[in-house]
Image: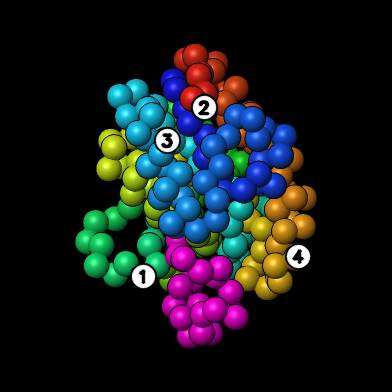
Amino acid sequence: MKIALFAAVEEEVLNIKEKVHLCGIGRENATNAMLRFMEQHRNEEFTILNIGTAGAHTAPVGSLIRVTEIVSGGAAFINHPMLLDRLPVETPEAADGKLFSSDCFVSPHVYSAEFLQGLREKADCFDMESSALYTVAKHFGKPYVSFKIVSDHLDVDLATWQQRVHDFSPTLCNFTLHLLDSIAKTEPVELIK
């Protein structure tokens, strides 16, 4: 199985950074990075595996989430669900959840309390890249899988978030390596760089 690992920033994946494509923060950066990658690898068969951090309402900080669906912020016109693919192994350490992906850092400083309350019914966690990565992957007919580690409950400033990204990087990297090892028990794994 060929896999292309994607993360937003190096700090999320310090221990495995040489194996990961970094797309940068935000949907425009993610779109550009994914399009450049797809231009080089469009004729290959592979799965995109996105890993990184996400804010959440209630999932414990430090917990892992297997994203099952993406809700795209600012794209109410999308009339089809963004349903994610699955890997051929079980991941009991990661709870299933829906992810809200927007151009803004999801926090009370950006969105109203009313909007955030309504968001509780639509998504379990939040990031700024997934909807773009998913859209480009699906445009090119590639399977897309995503796992996130919860960094905050929408209650931290930028400096605290950056520290948590650094602190949770080893856990996310170990989870990813274990995931790849689990897949390799049933079929060879090749990371595409």
Residue of label 1: 74
Between marks 3 and 4 in the image, the one whose residue lies nearer the viewer:
3
Residue of label 3: 37
Mark 4, other Cα within 10 Å: few <14 / some 14–19 / many ≥20:
few
Disc nearer the start of the sequence (2/1): 1
Relative vertical location of residue 112 with respect to residue 11 in this rendering, above or below: below
Disc nearer the start of the sequence (2/4): 4
**What is the x, y in percent for residue 181?**
60, 22
Residue at image position (61%, 53%) is 53
For the residues labelled 2 and 3, the Cα–Cα distance comes to: 9 Å
Which label sits on residue 193? 2
**Residue type beneath disc 3:** Phe
For the residues labelled 3 and 1, the Cα–Cα distance comes to: 25 Å
142 magenta-colored: no
101 magenta-colored: yes
Mark 1, other Cα within 10 Å: few <14 / some 14–19 / many ≥20:
few
Residue of label 4: 160
> Tag 1, which secondary structure?
loop
Can residue 85 be spotted in the picture?
no
Q: Nearer the viewer, residue 100 or 141?
A: 141
Pick the quarter of the image with the N terminus.
Answer: top left
Can residue 53 be spotted in the picture?
yes
The quarter holding residue 122 reads bottom left
Between marks 2 and 1 in the image, the one whose residue lies nearer the viewer:
2
Residue at image position (32%, 29%) is 42
Magenta highlight range? 98-120
Relative vertical location of residue 112 with respect to residue 64 in this rendering, above or below: below
> Tag 2, which secondary structure?
loop
The quarter holding residue 163 reads bottom right
